[in-house]
Structure formats: C-alpha cells, structure tokens
C-alpha cells in the first residue's frame, strides 16, 4: 500500500509517453498527492528495427513497467490504452481512463499531400496491420511499408524521404502540438481506429485501484470496456487487423462499430451493434459475434493457419 509517501508513476521515455505521464501527475497533484516520475525502458522501445508482430506484439511496451508495478518499485503506470492487451497480469487493474482525445487516424506527408493525391506506387509507412489493411483496401496501388519509432522519429522519416507518407494517431500529434503536420484526418469509415485509441489508461496494483478512481472519465471508461470486450472475445493481438470504436448515444445507449481485415486489404468484415451503456461488455461480445458471422471467422482462420 502507498500510505502517505509520494506516488511513483512509471512511464516510457518517449515525448508522447512523458506528456501523458505528466498529465496524470498534474491531476494527482491537484488531488493533493505528492508525485514522482520514473522513466522505464521497455523491450518495445529497444527493438526498433523489426515489426512488433515479429517480436511479441504491443505488450512489449508494457512488460517492464508492469513488472515494476508488481515489484512495488512504482505505484502507477500510464499507458496509451491501444497498447494494453485484453488480459492484464494477475494483481494489476486498469484503475482509470482519462477523457478520450479524438480517436481518428491522420496522414502526414511531405508537402501535406492528401491520400487521394499520392501517386501510384507511393510509399506509406505504418507498422499497424489494422491501418495497413484499410489503406490497401482504399489504395491497392500504394506500397505500405513498415515504419517503427516514436512520433518525432516517424515524422523525420517522412520529411527526409524514407517514405512518402505515414499514418499516425491524431491524438498523439495533438498532444505534442504537431497537428500542423497533418495532411489529412481520416474519417472513421475510411480508417476505423484501434481499440482504445486516443485514451490514456492508468494501471495500478489491484489493491491500490481506488487511488486513481477520481481521475476516471466515466463515458470514456464505458466505451473502453465495450471496445476491449471485442478484443477479448476475438482473441485479438498484434497479428490480427482488428478495429473497434464505441460511442455513447445519449446517456443510456451505446453504438459500436468494428472491423476484421485481411492484411492485404482483400477482405474487410464489418459490423455494428447497439446496446445499453450500462452493459458495455455485453455490446462488445455481441459485436464480436457479428464480425465473425460477417466473414471475420474465415479471415481469422486463414491468418492463424499461417
């Protein structure tokens, strides 16, 4: 238990991760807590030359931080929710979600050229299978290439011509004051977001979960629970192009859209569902069933047979 000592926040060391951790720090300090910050290098940060799917998936951005939580050397971990696997280690809990930023994807390109104006054969960078399959479905003439690195690194790679364009989360660009770099913001129909995209998640030991409860934004948490239920039901991981986006329609109703895609963009299974906002996991599981029935089962079977 934390008691009266300062709360120790653990975070990755990228500019975006530090922005998010400092945001949580400021909120905890406003609640009267003393807070310190610890930067932790993760396996995902150290391995920059290989696709995430080849080295273990997005969970590699969390392992060392979660190990520090379990060891008691930090008390709070701050993550981008889209990086958090559906299943947490025993003894840990997602204690709060901050209010969601815009979850859409954004295109950055040299001279701010939008997607429709990129020439045939243009190279567009992303390590996300979800983004890649939707890009290939829209523009099969483009070359989608792996692009690792933090936000600043990826922007530099675009500007120096390693690729002609890249797709990043709009939320991260906004948080870093880089929205002026955006050539185009994709609609939710053209690029359905990653599960949890735009949401800052706070993870603690289960026994300390109430510590951050005052920071929780209930509408965001409701939507996050629905989206993560889709992920859990489908067994989603870094190897499968899965997307889901939940939104509240009034105070009582939840709308949920989802997608399962073939990596080459040749098949996209889409589905939507509505449900009561007080049962978000139920809506998530219902959407997963609809996605499987819409062709997702065959896509997943083909992927897992590889």
Image (tube, rainbow, N blue to C red):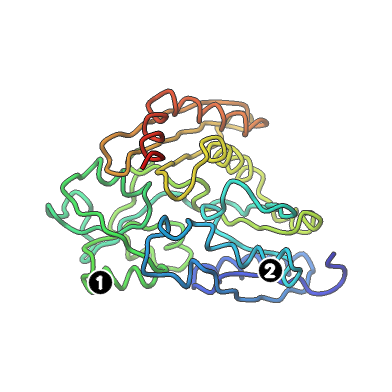
| Viewer-closest of 109 and 284 | 284
Measuring 14% from the left and 54% from the top, which residue is drawn there? 121
Measuring 55% from the left and 51% from the top, which residue is drawn there? 100
- Single out the mark in the foreground, 1 or 2: 2
Q: What percent of the width, then of the height, locates residue 196?
A: 53, 48
Which SS class for mark 1? helix
| Viewer-closest of 277 and 280 | 280
Closer to the chain start, of discs 1 and 2, is: 2
Residue 289 is marked as: none
In screen coordinates, is 148 left or right of 98? left
Quarter containing the C terminus: top left
The answer for how far apart the CA atoms under marks 1 and 2 are is 37 Å
Q: Residues within 10 Å of mark 1 (few under 14, many from 20)?
A: some
Q: Looking at this rendering, what residue extends furthest in the left direction?
A: 120
| Figure check: 289 above or below 209 | above
| Figure check: 49 above or below 224 | below
Q: Residues within 10 Å of mark 2 (few under 14, many from 20)?
A: some
Quarter containing the N terminus: bottom right
Q: Which residue is mark 2?
A: 68
Q: What percent of the width, then of the height, locates residue 216?
A: 69, 51
In screen coordinates, is 17 left or right of 187? right
Q: Which residue is mark 1?
A: 159
């Amino acid at each position: 238990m934390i008691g009266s000592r300062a709360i120790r926040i653990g975070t990755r060391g990228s500019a975006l991760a530090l922005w998010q951790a400092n945001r949580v720090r400021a909120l905890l300090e406003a609640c009267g807590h003393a807070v310190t910050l610890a930067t932790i290098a993760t396996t995902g940060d150290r391995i920059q030359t290989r696709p995430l799917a080849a080295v273990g998936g997005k969970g590699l951005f969390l392992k060392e931080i979660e190990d520090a939580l379990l060891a008691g050397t930090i008390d709070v971990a701050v993550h981008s929710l889209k990086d958090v696997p559906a299943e947490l280690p025993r003894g840990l809990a997602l204690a709060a979600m901050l209010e969601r930023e815009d979850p859409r994807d954004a295109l950055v390109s040299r001279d701010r050229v939008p997607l429709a104006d990129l020439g045939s054969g243009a190279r567009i960078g992303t390590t996300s299978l979800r983004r890649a399959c939707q890009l290939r479905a829209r523009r099969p003439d483009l070359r989608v290439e792996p692009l690792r690195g933090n936000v600043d690194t990826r922007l530099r790679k675009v500007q120096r011509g390693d690729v002609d364009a890249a797709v990043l989360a709009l939320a991260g660009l906004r948080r870093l004051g880089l929205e002026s770099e955006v050539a185009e913001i994709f609609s939710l129909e053209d690029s359905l977001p990653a599960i949890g995209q735009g949401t800052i998640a706070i993870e603690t030991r289960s026994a300390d979960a109430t510590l951050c409860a005052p920071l929780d934004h209930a509408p965001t948490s409701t939507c996050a629970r629905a989206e993560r239920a889709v992920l859990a039901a489908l067994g989603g991981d870094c190897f499968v192009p899965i997307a889901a986006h939940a939104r509240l329609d009034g105070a009582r109703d939840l709308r949920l859209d989802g997608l399962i895609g073939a990596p080459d963009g040749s098949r996209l299974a889409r589905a939507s569902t509505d449900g009561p906002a007080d049962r978000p996991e139920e809506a998530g599981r219902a959407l997963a069933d609809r996605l499987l029935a819409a062709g997702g089962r065959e896509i997943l079977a083909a992927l897992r047979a590889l």
